[in-house]
Amino acid sequence: MGAKVLEPGDDKPLMTKVADGDQQAFGRIFDHYSAKVYAYAFRFLRSQQLSEDIVQDVFTNIWLKRDKLPEINNFGAYLRVVSKNHTLNALKKLALDFKTNEISQKEWNDIDNTTESGIMVKETLALLNEAIQKLPPQQQNIYRMCHMEGLKQKDVAERLHISPLTVKVHLREATKTIRGLMDNHADLPLLLVILFHLAK
């Protein structure tokens, strides 16, 4: 982008200038760090569009809160925290959207396969379904009723004519099993982990 590369020690004076509303200084910060923010977001989101949105959100947030910049001693560390928070929020939003829409296996074919996010969703749901299929029948049934159908544990207990404690034990074992299976996928999208935890 033609901007001068930042040298060690350049951050602090630039932060002061940005705090005073210097857009050129802000541009230098953006040019130097935006690729790092994008790389971090893409590592987890695996979507060009979503990662670009994270970059925009992160630096918009920095600009809006620029009066606090002079107080930051390590801007790189600060930026990593902000990037992490925005990325996790994006993942949680995606997971909640999936949960709210109650996407089931028979609806997978309706997901748009032409977009990065659509492909990511389909891969994520396929991995989750694969893990569930490996559960013992009773655990699988209880897990689906609680996390796919959204039923409360006491309602599942009534429907299956078992005690709430039994449901809780089966659900705990199912959770433990799925976690173990997820650990075997080095390339598992973080979204699946978020989905898994939000489904409790």
Image (cartoon, helix red, strand yellow):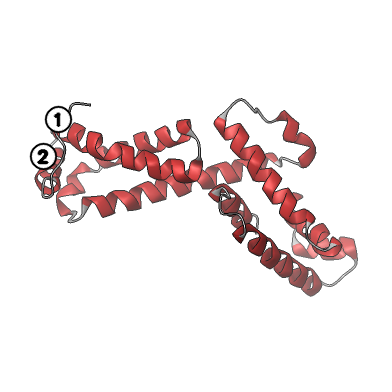
Task: Give the image quarter of residue 41.
Answer: top left
Q: Quadrant of the C terminus?
A: bottom right
Residue, x 64% and y 62% (percent of image)?
Answer: 179
- Note whether residue 151 is visible: no
- Note whether residue 130 is visible: yes
In the picture, measured across the screen, residue 198 lies left or right of residue 80, that is: right
- Viewer-nearest residue: 163 or 111: 111
Q: Residue furthest right?
A: 161
Residue identifier under label 2: 17
Residue identifier under label 1: 24
Q: Earlier in the sequence, mark 1 or mark 2?
A: 2
Residue, x 58% and y 27% (percent of image)?
Answer: 115
How far across and how far down the image is residue 117, in percent? 57, 34
Which amino acid lies under the numbered mark 2 shown in the image of this protein? Lys
In the picture, measured across the screen, residue 111 lies left or right of residue 59, that is: right
For the residue labelled by badge 1, is the local secondary structure a helix, a strand or a loop? helix
Q: Quadrant of the N terminus?
A: top left
How far across and how far down the image is residue 154, in percent? 78, 65
Cβ–Cβ under 8 Å for marks 1 and 2: yes
For the residue labelled by badge 2, is the local secondary structure a helix, a strand or a loop? helix
